[in-house]
Image (cartoon, grey):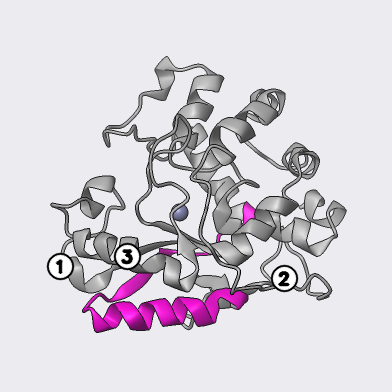
Amino acid sequence: MKSAQIITNDIFAQVLGLTDQHIHYFETPTNTKTLGIHRLMLTDFQALVTSAAKADIEIKIASGFRSFERQLVIWNNKFTGKTAIKNSGGEQVNITELNEDEIVAAIMLYSALPGVSRHHWGCDIDIYAANLLAGKPLQLEPWEYESSGPMAKLSTWLDHNAATFGFYFPYDCYRGGIAAEPWHLSYVPLAKQYQAAFSLENLQQCLFNSDLSGKSTILENLPNLVKRFSNNINVCELSLHNRSIQINTDTTGETRG
Ligand SMILES: [Zn+2]
């Protein structure tokens, strides 16, 4: 992809999901690099998992790092109607009744625009407790994490313990942008650095050079979309001065788009 060649500064490439050099991939039966998280988050994440296990909660990652290209496929499939867009009630949205602006807003309730997904950073993950599913498939819907849902025990435990390990919920409630996502955890020591490195100009350039569906509508509206969906989140007020992790930007790994 062209934009991967243009944006060469490493942290900017990481912010946009154009590289995976910051990612540690977990071994899977197929070893296809399907599940990975930021390597500087591994220690604290593993400590969180170990602590939860003592409370009989077996934490698993439903979704970790996602590249720009992966997010682009998700986006384009929704924009073109190949995959369903759901509203906050879990019902399918009929996109034939919507204009492009409305389709963009409907997708962004649950799926980020490529280049602004916090999953590009590798320090944001969607989690669940495998042992609390009781044989039912995980749907990543809010009711599962509420007090009467199968993940209630996980939610309560995280409310009390996530901050101890440096994690918080950026999508704790709906603020007019992204829906509440009680499964989405963010690792603050790294996330705040990616947030600070975000550049609207780089995003614009990257999207301009991509095969994004709805591109002209999106580019016209980009500052507003970023304001409404990316910046309109839970501001982390955790006291994490005991954690200082510097993202190494000197690495010379290969970037990919
Ligand atoms: Zn997520």
Q: Name the amino acid, label 2.
A: Ile
Q: Nearer the viewer, mark 3 or mark 1?
A: 3
First reached walking from the N terminus: tag 3 or tag 2: 3
Q: Quadrant of residue 5?
A: bottom right
Residue 122 in view in this figure? no
First reached walking from the N terminus: tag 2 or tag 1: 1
Residues at marks 3 and 2, CA–CA distance in whole angstroms? 28 Å
Q: Residues within 10 Å of mark 3 (few under 14, many from 20)?
A: few
Label 3 sits on residue: 160
- Asked if residue 94 lies left or right of residue 101, the reply is left
First reached walking from the N terminus: tag 3 or tag 1: 1
Residues at marks 3 and 1, CA–CA distance in whole angstroms? 26 Å
Task: Write the start and end of the magenta stretch as one range.
Answer: 40-68
Q: Secondary structure at mark 1?
A: loop
Q: Residues within 10 Å of mark 2 (few under 14, many from 20)?
A: some
Q: Secondary structure at mark 2?
A: loop
Q: Name the amino acid, label 3.
A: His
Q: Position of residue 107 (x, y in %)?
A: 47, 34
Q: Nearer the viewer, residue 193 or 31?
A: 193
Label 2 sits on residue: 247
Residue 187 inside the magenta-drawn segment: no
